[in-house]
Amino acid sequence: MQDFEFNDYKRLTRGYLRDYRMWQSAIEVWASEKADIDSELASIPIATSKFCGEAGGGSGELTPTEREANRRVKFTERALSIARDTRELRRVMKNIKTAIGTLDDESKRLIVMHYIDGRTWMEVADALACSESGARQKGYRAVSKIAAILFGSKINQYTQVVLIA
């Protein structure tokens, strides 16, 4: 596995923050897709049996029952994949929300305005009544804190002590 430096984790954290709204939309789309798949599965009247990891028997052509079983297997696999991806995305989003919650109010606003809402550093600076460079610096510190919370167990001990101190 590749060794990551703290700056790599900060870069990854910035990406997570920028993608947060997109992930919310993805979860909604996946929920709709899963509901459609569940409805389709309910309309397939047969039970599924698998032989050697595949639905159906040993002939080259599938019988109607085997075709339906194969269709059911594919829908079930897709539904399980969507459920797994949704759980993982929700877990990451919950961790991000928790990490943002540990910040002071100004840092929270800054993170939300710049990374999640997509405002420029100048717009953030105007809203917080500070300079653009001051907003950037506060933003970088806030991202460092969030990265330390999200990836603390993966960051070497020295970096954690310096960051928190």
Image (cartoon, rainbow, N blue to C red):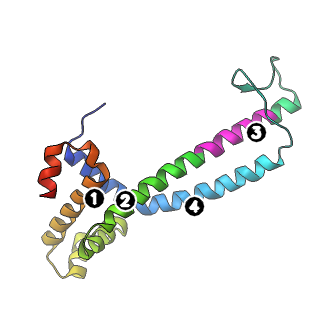
Badges 4 and 1: C-beta atoms under 8 Å apart? no
On screen, residue 90 versus residue 15, left or right, reads right
Badge number at residue 72: 3
Q: Earlier in the sequence, mark 1 or mark 2?
A: 2
* Depth order, front residue of 156/28: 156
Badges 3 and 4: C-beta atoms under 8 Å apart? no
Residue visible at 18% across and 82% down? 129
For disc 2, the marked residue is: 96
For disc 1, the marked residue is: 146
Q: CA distance from mark 4 to mark 2?
A: 18 Å
Classify mark 2: helix, strand or loop. Answer: helix
Q: Could you tell me residue 88's position as x and y percent?
A: 48, 49
> Which span of residues is magenta-colored?
69-81
Say what amino acid the circle numbered 2 marks: Ile
Classify mark 3: helix, strand or loop. Answer: helix
Q: Could you tell me residue 2's position as x and y percent?
A: 28, 33
Say what amino acid the circle numbered 1 marks: Ile
Badges 1 and 2: C-beta atoms under 8 Å apart? yes
For disc 4, the marked residue is: 28
On screen, residue 138 versus residue 84, left or right, reads left
Q: CA distance from mark 1 to mark 2?
A: 7 Å
